[in-house]
Amino acid sequence: NRVNEAAVQKKSIEIVYYTMSRKKEGKRKVDPYRIWFFNGTFYLIGYCHKRRDIRIFAVDRIKMLHQTKDSFEIPEEFDFEEFMRPSFGVCQGENVRVKIWFAPEAAGYIKEKIWHDTQEIVPQKDGSIIFEAEVAGTDEIKYWVMSWGSKALVLEPTSVKDEVRIESEVLLERYATDLLSQDKSSSA
């Protein structure tokens, strides 16, 4: 509510924010442009004075918030829809063209939904499909592909294909080893 109030009043906020990638808290001043609810989480989209750029913050990771007396204006050229368009979810990053094969068992589910504005779906003779899109960043697309299990295969780019392969190898190794019995035997 306090973040939303600051956005409505166009007042800058000072926050202590936990950055998941760096596993540490840091203080920032942010001009809150918009609150956005996506996939079960509230996000703040705004201008970060520390990074001098528009950034996305998970509201759950704001550890402290103070509304300042400083007013701001949202730049006329800022378009929320355009800002979020390249992302496959929330994450931003360099635009990457992805090409993913989906087995016939998954093809119907993929075809019935618009997953991304740039998606193209190419049907294959065997009932499978190839999904192509230009996405910002690769983490979310990687996790999306993995959520389809053996019914999806990254064809391009090689970097994402390698990331999924490595993640799958680690997963396979964890399932091949009973971590709980290892912990019990090492503490005994």
Image (tube, rainbow, N blue to C red):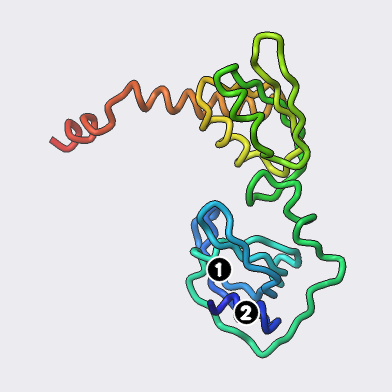
- Kind of residue at badge 1: Gly
Find the residue positioned furthest to the right: 77
> Which residue is at a point 70% across and 22% down the rendered structure image?
130
**Label 2: few (<14), some or many (≥20) within 10 Å?**
many
Q: Is 63 on the left or on the right of 186, as rendered? A: right
**Label 1: few (<14), some or many (≥20) within 10 Å?**
few
Q: CA distance from mark 1 to mark 2?
A: 14 Å
Q: Is 174 on the left or on the right of 104, as rendered? A: left
Looking at the image, residue 114 lies above or below residue 99: below
Q: Which quadrant of the figure contains the C terminus?
A: top left
* Label 2 secondary element: strand
Where in the figure is residue 7, as x and y percent of width and height? Answer: 66, 77
Name the foreground residue: 77 vs 61. 77
> Which residue is at a point 75% across and 49% down the rendered structure image?
85
Where in the figure is residue 187, as x and y percent of width and height? Answer: 17, 38
- Kind of residue at badge 2: Ile
Single out the mark in the foreground, 1 or 2: 2
Q: Quadrant of residue 131?
A: top right
Looking at the image, residue 167 lies above or below residue 118: above
Name the residue beneath numbered marker 2: 13
* Label 1 secondary element: strand
Q: Which mark is residue 26?
A: 1
Looking at the image, residue 167 lies above or below residue 88: above
> Which residue is at a point 82% across and 65% down the rendered structure image?
78
Where in the figure is residue 76, as x and y percent of width and height? Answer: 86, 71
Can residue 48 be seen here? The reply is no
Find the residue positioned furthest to the left: 188
